[in-house]
Image (cartoon, rainbow, N blue to C red):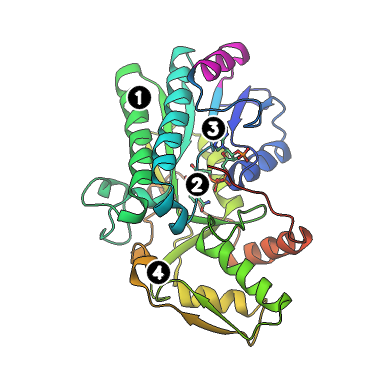
Amino acid sequence: MLNKNTKIFLAGHNGLVGGAILKQLINRGYKNIITISKKKLDLRDQKKVFNFIKAKKPKFIIIAAASVGGIAANNTFKADFIYNNTAIQNNLIHSAFLNGIKNLIFLGSSCVYPRQCKQPIKEEYLLTGPLEKTNEPYAIAKIAGIKMCESYNYQHNTNYLCIMPCNAFGPNDNYDLLTSHFFPALIRRLSDAVNNKKKSIKLWGTGKAKRELIYVDNIADACIFFMNKKVKHSLINIGSEEESSIKQFVEKVRNKIGKGIQIEFDNNKEMDGTPRKILDCSIARSYGWKKKISFNIGLELTLNDFFKRKGNFRKIKF
Ligand SMILES: NC(=O)c1ccc[n+]([C@@H]2O[C@H](COP(=O)([O-])OP(=O)(O)OC[C@H]3O[C@@H](n4cnc5c(N)ncnc54)[C@H](OP(=O)(O)O)[C@@H]3O)[C@@H](O)[C@H]2O)c1
């Protein structure tokens, strides 16, 4: 569907997911990639976004720009999460349509599915029950993005595809303890404990909630795979199809950094979030996609990147 000279606008190229997509597009020989920093173009600004898309005329847009964070950020910056995300996606999706751009990928997340969802989660379970309260505004924004893509496909015959990955980790993650997801926060907490010669650390929640994690290059690979595929679905789950409890993830990371550090949980159930979420990826598999990089290799690559940064992590502002 695409050739290596196709003009692609990648929104959010400095982020965890966008950065991985950019690296893989370049490695695979795509030569015509447009990126722009948030400083130069705030994607919440409708007029500027419309003018930018009109001037650059990309043939394909990937939306990896969003306000993203862990449970504490989602529970605190609720207004930012709903406003920023609906504004970014509305501006990009509608200006894609106005400029005759037929193909687009919109990235969402597995938190769009109901809190007590049947497992493994199939795409068809969207909107079958109430959402997890702590990230409801973020999930509602993402669901609006999915419905917007579906509606434009229906009414305007576009091919706007929504990719829903499970929790991601990888190089250049957000390691800010107040805004990050649980996995980068865990790496940071254990590393800080080692540096400060602490014998124990206390983590949020009970440790019993189960999560599915995917190394971010697998998400980038899925985006490029589906950019080049004609698909009849507008919503596709992307996961590793392996789940562990938070306690088990703690063990996996503690074995690499911080052996011997005691872990306590504060047993605050509210900080567990959704009890379990593992994605059913049979639709992705039916097109021939599956993850290539295992959790263990992904963890090695992530930790190498983490230590190379020597505490110099990017800052997230909502
Ligand atoms: N992280 C995960 O575990 C995960 C899992 C599944 C799906 N996803 C999805 O993947 C997408 C990207 O997530 P991520 O983890 O890569 O997030 P991230 O690391 O925080 O990156 C988000 C990117 O969006 C940009 N951005 C935010 N607001 C912007 C604005 N107003 N104007 C322009 N750019 C803006 C940021 O730019 P700056 O760097 O300049 O701030 C950053 O480059 C999201 O849609 C998310 O739902 C993420």
Residue under circle 1?
A: 153
Which quarter of the picture shows residue 243?
A: bottom left
Question: Is residue 178 in view from this perspective?
Answer: yes
Q: Residues within 10 Å of mark 1 (few under 14, many from 20)?
A: some
Range covered by the magenta-colored residues: 47-59
Give the Cα separation between the discs numbered 2 and 1: 26 Å
- Name the main secondary structure of what is drawn in magenta: helix
Q: Nearer the viewer, mark 4 or mark 1?
A: 4
* Mark 2: C-beta under 8 Å from nearest atom of ligand 1: yes
Callouts 2 and 1 close, C-beta under 8 Å:
no
Give the Cα separation between the discs numbered 4 and 1: 34 Å
Residue under circle 4?
A: 210
Asked if residue 18 lies left or right of residue 78, the reply is right
Asked if residue 308 lies left or right of residue 188, the reply is right
Residue type at the position of mark 3? Ile
Q: Residues within 10 Å of mark 2 (few under 14, many from 20)?
A: many
Residue type at the position of mark 2? Val
Which quarter of the picture shows residue 266?
A: bottom left
Residue under circle 2?
A: 68
* Pointer 2 or 1: first along the chain: 2
Residue type at the position of mark 1? Asn
Residue under circle 3?
A: 62
